[in-house]
Image (tube, grey):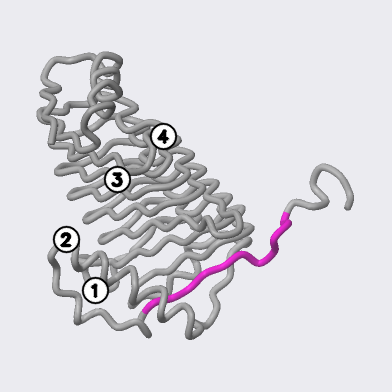
Amino acid sequence: MKTIDALNICYRQLNSLIDKAIEADKSISLKNVFGQRYIGRGLPEKVKLKIYGIPGNDMAACMDGAELEIFGNAQDAVGNTMNYGNIIVHGNCGDTLGYAMRGGEIYVEGNVGYRVGIHMKEYKKMKPVIVVGGKAGEFLGEYMAGGAIILLGLNIKKGEPIVGKFCGTGMHGGSIYLNSDSDDEYLFGKEAVKVVLADEDVFFLKKHIDFYSKIFKKNLNHLKIESFSKYVSVSKNPYSNMYCAN
């Protein structure tokens, strides 16, 4: 595994070093990362990055199959327009996580900020997934068109909201799963509706919870699938008559 020390290196230079390094070694360890942007942007499959520190905005933008594991927090717009690949964050993430994400999976051990999953979408077999161990801020799943977001709500207090207001605003596809013991429907926009879990939802949740438990080494046997709420869009075309009749 190739090791790159990012201490005091500009983001342009760091990304250039990564591009050159993967020509010879597909596994890269980045040490002393501190706010450098665009790490992992456009990286293809078979490339693996282990990042120690705090990567900057737009990490894994347009990523095309690589695997990133971050030992620390991450900033905003992680996975921006990501196509394929996997991201594991041993910490918290900022705002707009998974912006326009088109495929792949993101696992966050802790909490996330605002507008997570905004404009997420899916196409045929490409179905992006975001799994968050804690809670999320406002506008979760805003304008969401596909994929799935799972909030596990670990370590939140009883009755504490797992998500902020305006969740699912403008939503017209995809699914949002919340593990919460409180009534969260009032936090959602009018474009989202709560539905009953189906057998396929149970299988889907168990699969991703098991993987979260494995990668973060957490015992989640206390989680009960029946305690999850599922929200989907009321319509696939909620703005059909806003700009033109159809």
Q: Amino acid at mark 1?
A: Lys
Q: Amino acid at mark 4?
A: Ala
> Where's residue 67, x and y in %?
29, 45
List the residue tagged with mark 2: 216
Q: Residues within 10 Å of mark 4 (few under 14, many from 20)?
A: many
Q: Residues within 10 Å of mark 2 (few under 14, many from 20)?
A: some
> Where's residue 168, x and y in %?
53, 58
Was residue 30 drawn as part of the magenta stretch in this picture?
A: no
What element does badge 3 sit on?
strand
Given this view, does label 3 or label 4 mark the residue nearer the observer? 3
Compared across the picture, whether 90 is left or right of 151 comes to left
As measured in the structure, the alpha-carbon distance from the residue carrying label 2 to the one carrying label 1 is 23 Å
Q: Earlier in the sequence, mark 4 or mark 1?
A: 4
Decide: marks 2, 3 in contact (CB < 8 A)? Answer: no
Name, please, the residue furthest toward the right: 245
As measured in the structure, the alpha-carbon distance from the residue carrying label 1 to the one carrying label 3 is 35 Å
Q: Which residue is rendered at x = 20% and y = 41% of the image?
A: 73
Q: Which residue is rendered at x = 79% and y = 52% of the image?
A: 240
Q: Earlier in the sequence, mark 2 or mark 1?
A: 1
List the residue tagged with mark 1: 158
**Magenta segment:** 228-238
